[in-house]
Image: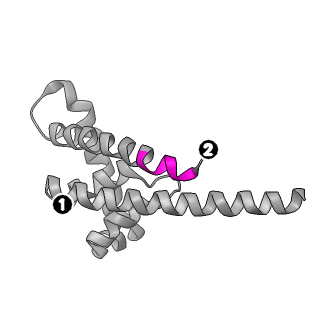
Amino acid sequence: MDMLFFIPLALFYDWIQIPIFGILLEQSTSRLKVLSWLKKRVNKAMESMENKAFLRRIINLGDIGVILVSALPIRGFGILSGSILTFFMKKGRKEGSFLLLTGSLMGIFITMALATSAMDLIKGYIR
């Protein structure tokens, strides 16, 4: 199967996640008691983000920082982390979604490049 088939599939998956995470984050700041546990988690994450120099540097990068966080294919980064970052940076829905989808697309290409390189390397050893 062609790897290019997975680009729209991965983008669609992220496209679904962004509004879900956005709604959860917006609701966590409301007065709903059902989401009080989420509000505590968001506040705890916000406090820990403020104390970490690496994350402060990413926040100082602004829009590029959001794209980097959502693009890097390593644990602790991705759409959820990018969504939280856009929420803390008080980005609007449209701007935040655009930045997250841009990062997602870059992350897909990074992942494809790494996977293709690894597959080529393995094929080279098998021959």
Q: Which mark is residue 66?
A: none
Q: Residues within 10 Å of mark 2 (few under 14, many from 20)?
A: few
Tell me residue 15's x, y (percent). Answer: 31, 45
Q: Which mark is residue 1?
A: 2
Q: What residue lies at 71% left-to-right and 60% top-to-bottom?
A: 118
Task: Give the position of the C terminus as an image quadrant.
Answer: bottom right
Label pair 1/2, CB-CB below 8 angstroms: no
Identity of the amino acid at label 2?
A: Met
Task: Give the position of the N terminus as an image quadrant.
Answer: top right
Q: Is residue 11 above or below residue 73?
A: above
Q: Is residue 18 above or below residue 111?
A: above
Label 1 SS? helix
- The residue furthest front is 2
- The residue furthest top is 34
Q: What residue lies at 80% left-to-right and 57% top-to-bottom?
A: 122
Question: What is the chief secondary structure element of the magenta stretch?
Answer: helix
**Residue in the foreground of this view, choosing between 53 and 17:** 17
Label 2 SS? loop
- Confirm whether the magenta stretch covers residue 7: yes
Identity of the amino acid at label 1?
A: Glu
Tell me residue 84's x, y (percent). Answer: 29, 51
Distance in Å between CA atoms under marks 1 and 2: 34 Å
For residue 125, which quarter of the picture? bottom right
Q: Earlier in the sequence, mark 1 or mark 2?
A: 2
**Residue in the foreground of this view, choosing between 7 and 51:** 7
Q: What residue lies at 10% left-to-right and 37% top-to-bottom?
A: 30
Q: Which residues are magenta?
A: 3-8
